């Protein structure tokens, strides 16, 4: 802990008001001027709770119980609400995830920026007028002057986020907290926003806390990283150290679950989910999911955060005994598959929303047992294409054939055989399952519609479908509300599989899930595809996923396929300028890969057991 | 400087006043909303008050000490040991009339509410799910009926046909249907845009089945809330009609007629008005509190669901960026 540390957090503890169950505990770190700490973890790990606590704020229902947060020499947690108000923005600033909700939709950007300076009691350090200061900060975040006279809705997502960043950086705070600021943005916009943040922090000497679930983004931006699990820091250290030689099994699992465009490694998902506040086990919180867990050694006492080298600390009692390794690379698995007959053919498909055309003449052919990935940024028309194929979007022209049979636009008018053959899995598992129906009803629904099987036989097939998606018969009587996001998405896939389709159209099905869950689902899809000779259309914005699963990739941009070829070809030697840009803008985790060819379970090696 | 996002602030200031301890643990679809409601203080108080009034109305007729239409004493006698609540304008026992004057009112109220909610819900769900011209026609029809104040509309019907009990029920139902229709339509619109409805569309599930099996089960909370609110309105409308002489007819006792009849004796024996008015008030407060609890618990259930969702209900990829 250096003397001139900008931010010192010690023993931070946030609890659920009333019950006293801790959400976050024993969080401690310090940051120097100009240094950036990445705070990474899956949903529910407490990273946002920590971020807000740095501003002296706790979400409704939570209370900051103890600890100190000293920013710029001021202990925030001892301040009165009124004093905190003065500190926020001027000493400690915050950039939220969704800029659209951070900006006042009724006021022009210029007015909102000027308000920031007007409320600043300290006045300008250089004696500049407000207008001059607005101009300066605008230039710093590389926003056009024209943005000043625009309302927030007239700006793109990236511009909105820049405006929000401008407001946060405006008064040159000592500490800035960025809560997933690039999560909703396209990779290109994300890269620009990240570089803006990096430059600003370095130039102004601001200590930044960068909260993200995206390891690659953290790797691009941060100097140090703290991995959070179940409200504790499980590993903290310099980026290079933590990412290249992770010591905590959870960090290793996370890194192994991140898909990469560089190598087609089998993604390793982690079973289970983090324990919730109040339900945390004795001993190490990760023990129930940890492949290295030893009874008593790991399950009796909570392990302390031990310093192992330099600034690298790990919360694992077995850190000296185990040598976990990140999933190994291998050459693409998907390439050797023999192509079958064409199952789905699309010719010159043009689709529109109202007067606006969003898909401009797309051709594609999908063979039996083949996996085609359609990659594109939001607004590229990829979801519209998928919805046209399955019959949910009906404003399109062109030809769509299933095994030589012409498919009409509306699903309701299609033949039962074609409906059965082409199944769709929705992006959001929180919306695609009827919350009032038990899983049994949901999974059996297609069977009731398309077959006249007996109740018993339907139940058997439902169980078989659930088991194919790594669930069990015990789920039959549960409701969607009792399931985690990953489990819900598995149920949605089971519902699609239960009537043995030929084509499965998956629309961003992992985008709302944590990486470890995403990895498990992608692995499952790959196995299913091989077992059942299922043809897959994977709609995704995640180029990393593509390498792990797809035979062929179609890159979509502004409603057109700009490139369509074998996966390795597109990723290794992209031809189109857009594809090249997309690949270049993608944040990478610079990890040293382990030896190739290891089976997935070998990512963990256990000497001396 | 707004350091904290307005969204974060809204969570503090604008969020519905849901106390954490008021959210019973494990309120899921399996645990019905009603069971959750009875775990809240608000729900228990509301249900208790409403039940009390219902008990008075149901058991009352059997325990009334006198015949409600018998003249047992002088008009507006003060309460005495023989007549605990005194007598009314014609010298009838107020206690007996109060005990006997509830069940008819409640029964008519229930019938009118049930009919009104049924009619309104049908209009709302059909309009929301079918959309297009049918939606427009139904909703404009609703607007026309809404243009009449509820009581005036009921009066219009009753004064044309004459005071018949079935007509009172019908008038109440017709007065409620538009409002129920509106509320249920917007709730059903929300539900029918969710992905699981699209999923049912994708297997071409018959529309009837989509409405009854997929949409309606998701409308139980707004339906319960509507029923609660409408029930108190129903009783008030019927009481109002009866007060004006169009609903329940004398000499049979009922709380509304009693208030009307005994207006003149407010100073002589105020109990003749206070007793029925008190019961009506109790019923209204009880049912409204219960309704409030239902709304809060079902909102809490949905709120928890929303809190666990990582992405918005609609896939952002659907947005067409300029």
Image (tube, grey):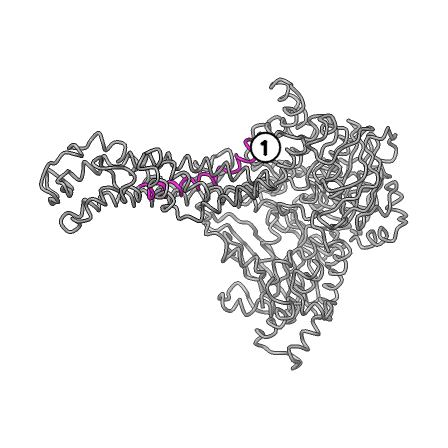
A239 or B242: nearer the eye?
Answer: B242
| Predominant SS along the magenta part | helix
How many marks overall?
A: 1
The answer to whether one can see residue A414 in this image is yes
The answer to whether one can see residue B300 in this image is no
Quadrant the N terminus of chain A occupies = bottom right
Image x and y of residue A360, in percent: 81, 47
Q: Residue furthest front?
A: B160
* Residue occupying image coordinates x 60% and y 27%: A440
Q: Is residue A114 above or below residue B53?
A: below
Quadrant for residue A55, please give it.
bottom right
Q: Chain of mark 1?
A: B
Quadrant the C terminus of chain A occupies = top right
Indicate left or right for A370 with B212 as reference.
right
Q: Which residues are magenta?
A: B211-238
Indicate left or right for B30 with B86 as reference.
right
A309 or A582: nearer the eye?
Answer: A582
Image x and y of residue A320, in percent: 71, 45
Image x and y of residue A172, in percent: 65, 71
- Name the residue tied to disc 1: B210
* Residue occupying image coordinates x 63% and y 21%: A458
Image x and y of residue A48, in percent: 61, 54
Secondary structure of the residue carrying tag 1 is: helix
Indicate left or right for A261 with B41 as reference.
right
Local packing at callout 1 (Cα closer than 10 Å; few below 14, some 14-19, many 20+) is: some
Quadrant for residue A471, please give it.
top right
Taking the magenta stretch, the answer to whether it contains residue A120 is no
């Amino acid at each position: 802990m250096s003397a001139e540390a900008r931010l010192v957090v010690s023993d931070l503890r946030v609890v659920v008001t009333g019950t006293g169950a801790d959400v976050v505990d024993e969080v401690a770190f310090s940051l120097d001027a100009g240094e950036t700490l990445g705070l990474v973890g899956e949903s529910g790990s407490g990273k946002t709770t920590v971020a807000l606590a740095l501003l002296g704020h706790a979400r409704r229902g939570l209370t900051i119980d103890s600890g100190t947060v000293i920013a710029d020499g001021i202990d925030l947690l001892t301040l009165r609400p009124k004093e905190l108000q003065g500190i926020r923005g001027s000493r400690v600033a915050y950039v939220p995830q969704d800029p659209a909700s951070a900006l006042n939709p009724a006021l022009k950007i210029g007015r909102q920026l000027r308000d920031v300076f007007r409320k600043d009691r300290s006045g300008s350090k250089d004696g500049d007028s407000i207008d001059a200061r607005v101009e300066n900060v605008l230039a710093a975040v590389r926003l056009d002057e024209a943005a000043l006279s625009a309302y927030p809705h007239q700006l793109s997502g990236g511009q909105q986020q820049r405006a929000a960043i401008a407001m946060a950086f405006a008064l040159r705070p000592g500490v800035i907290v960025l809560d997933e600021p690039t999560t909703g943005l396209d990779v290109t916009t994300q890269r620009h926003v990240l570089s803006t943040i990096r430059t600003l922090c370095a130039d102004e000497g601001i200590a930044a806390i960068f909260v993200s679930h995206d390891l690659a983004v953290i790797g691009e931006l941060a100097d140090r990283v703290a991995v959070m699990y179940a409200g504790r820091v499980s590993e903290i250290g310099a980026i290079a150290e933590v990412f290249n030689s992770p010591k905590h099994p959870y960090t290793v699992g996370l890194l192994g679950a991140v898909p990469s465009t560089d190598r087609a490694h089998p993604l390793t998902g982690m079973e289970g989910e983090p324990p919730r506040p109040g339900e945390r086990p004795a001993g190490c919180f990760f023990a129930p999911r940890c492949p290295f867990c030893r009874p008593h050694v790991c399950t009796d006492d909570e392990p302390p955060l031990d310093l192992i080298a330099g600034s690298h600390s790990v919360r694992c009692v077995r850190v000296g005994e185990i040598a976990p390794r990140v999933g190994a690379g291998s050459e693409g698995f998907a390439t050797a598959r023999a192509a079958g007959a064409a199952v789905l053919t699309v010719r010159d498909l043009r689709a529109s929303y109202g007067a606006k055309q969003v898909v401009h003449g797309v051709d594609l052919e999908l063979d039996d047992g083949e996996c085609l990935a359609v990659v594109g940024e939001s607004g590229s028309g990829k979801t519209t294409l998928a919805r046209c194929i399955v019959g949910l979007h009906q404003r399109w022209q062109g030809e769509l054939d299933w095994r030589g049979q012409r498919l009409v636009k509306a699903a309701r008018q299609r033949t039962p055989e074609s409906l059965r053959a082409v199944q769709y899995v929705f992006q959001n598992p929180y919306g695609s399952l009827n919350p009032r129906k038990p899983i049994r009803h949901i999974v059996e629904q297609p069977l009731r519609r398309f077959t006249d099987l007996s109740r018993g036989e339907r139940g058997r097939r439902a169980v078989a479908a659930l088991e194919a998606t790594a669930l069990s018969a015990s789920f039959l009587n549960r409701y969607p509300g009792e399931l985690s996001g990953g489990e819900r998405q598995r149920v949605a896939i089971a519902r699609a599989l239960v009537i043995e389709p030929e084509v499965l159209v998956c629309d961003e099905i992992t985008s709302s899930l944590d990486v470890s869950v995403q990895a498990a689902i992608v692995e499952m899809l790959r196995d299913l595809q091989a077992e059942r000779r299922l043809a897959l259309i994977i709609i995704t914005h995640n180029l990393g996923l593509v390498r792990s699963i797809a035979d062929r990739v179609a890159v979509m941009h502004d409603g057109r396929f700009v490139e369509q070829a074998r996966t390795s070809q597109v990723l290794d030697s992209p031809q189109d300028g857009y594809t090249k840009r997309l690949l270049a803008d993608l944040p990478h985790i610079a990890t040293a890969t382990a030896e190739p060819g290891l089976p997935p379970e070998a990512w963990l090696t256990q000497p001396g057991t | 400087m707004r350091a904290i996002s307005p969204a974060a602030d809204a969570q503090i200031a604008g969020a519905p006043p849901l106390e954490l301890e008021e959210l019973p643990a494990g309120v899921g679809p399996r645990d019905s909303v009603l069971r959750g409601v009875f775990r809240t203080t608000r729900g228990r108080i509301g249900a208790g008050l409403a039940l009390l009034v219902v008990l008075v109305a149901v058991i009352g007729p059997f325990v009334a000490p006198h015949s409600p239409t018998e003249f047992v004493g002088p008009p507006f006698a003060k309460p005495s040991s023989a007549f605990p609540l005194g007598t009314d304008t014609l010298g009838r026992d107020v206690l007996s009339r109060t005990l006997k004057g509830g069940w008819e009112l409640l029964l008519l109220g229930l019938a009118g509410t049930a009919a009104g909610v049924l009619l309104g819900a049908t209009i709302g769900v059909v309009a929301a799910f079918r959309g297009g011209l049918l939606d427009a026609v139904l909703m404009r029809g609703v607007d026309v009926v809404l243009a009449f104040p509820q009581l005036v509309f009921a009066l219009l019907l009753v004064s044309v046909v004459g005071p018949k009990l079935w007509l009172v029920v019908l008038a109440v139902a017709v007065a409620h249907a538009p409002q129920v229709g509106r509320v249920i339509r917007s709730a059903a619109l929300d539900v029918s845009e969710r992905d699981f409805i699209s999923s049912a569309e994708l297997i071409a599930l018959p529309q009837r089945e989509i409405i009854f099996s997929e949409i309606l089960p998701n409308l139980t909370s707004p339906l319960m809330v509507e029923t609660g609110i409408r029930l108190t309105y129903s009783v008030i409308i019927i009481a109002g009609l009866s007060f004006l002489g169009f609903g329940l007819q004398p000499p049979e006792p009922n709380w509304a007629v009693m208030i009307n009849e005994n207006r003149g004796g407010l100073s002589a024996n105020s109990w003749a008005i206070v007793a029925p008015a008190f019961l009506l008030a109790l019923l209204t407060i009880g049912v409204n509190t219960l309704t409030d609890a239902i709304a809060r618990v079902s909102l809490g259930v949905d709120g928890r669901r929303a809190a666990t969702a990582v992405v918005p209900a609609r896939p952002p990829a659907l947005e067409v960026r300029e």
